[in-house]
Image (cartoon, rainbow, N blue to C red):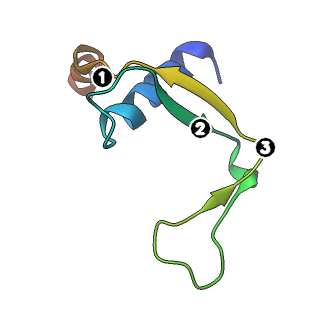
Amino acid sequence: MDDATLAEAANLAAFYSKAKNSSKVPVDYTIRKNVRKPNGSKPGMVIYDNNKTVYINPNEDDINKLNKLN
């Protein structure tokens, strides 16, 4: 994944989180094979390992630009 795609994905994740009004929001990412759902856990609950973290300032203007592309 290139840096621009990673920045767009991190911006989307940060913007649609509870921390959207914060600055330097940490966003973890990893490849799919490192993500799994624990047995008996609630829907949407996952655990992951071998992750990296990127810090992003959520930017609504960038989100609007992405929405206009679709």
* Along the viewing direction, whichever of 43 and 66 lies nearer the viewer: 43
What crowding class fits label 2: few (fewer than 14 Cα within 10 Å), some (14-19), or many (20 or more)?
some
Q: Between disc 3 and disc 2, whose residue precedes? A: 2
Residue pointed to by mark 3: 50
| Tag of residue 23 | none
Q: Above or below — where is 64 with respect to 53?
A: above
Residue drawn at x 75%, y 52% is 34
Q: Are marks 1 and 3 in contact (CB under 8 Å)?
A: no
Amino acid type, mark 1: Leu
- Residue 67 lies, in percent from the top left, at 24, 27
Crowd around label 3: few <14 · some 14–19 · many ≥20 (10 Å): few
Which residue corresponds to mark 1? 66
Residue of label 2: 28
Dot in front, 1 or 2: 2
Q: Quadrant of the C terminus?
A: top left
Question: How many other residues sit within 10 Å of disc 1, few (<14), some (14-19) or many (≥20)?
Answer: few
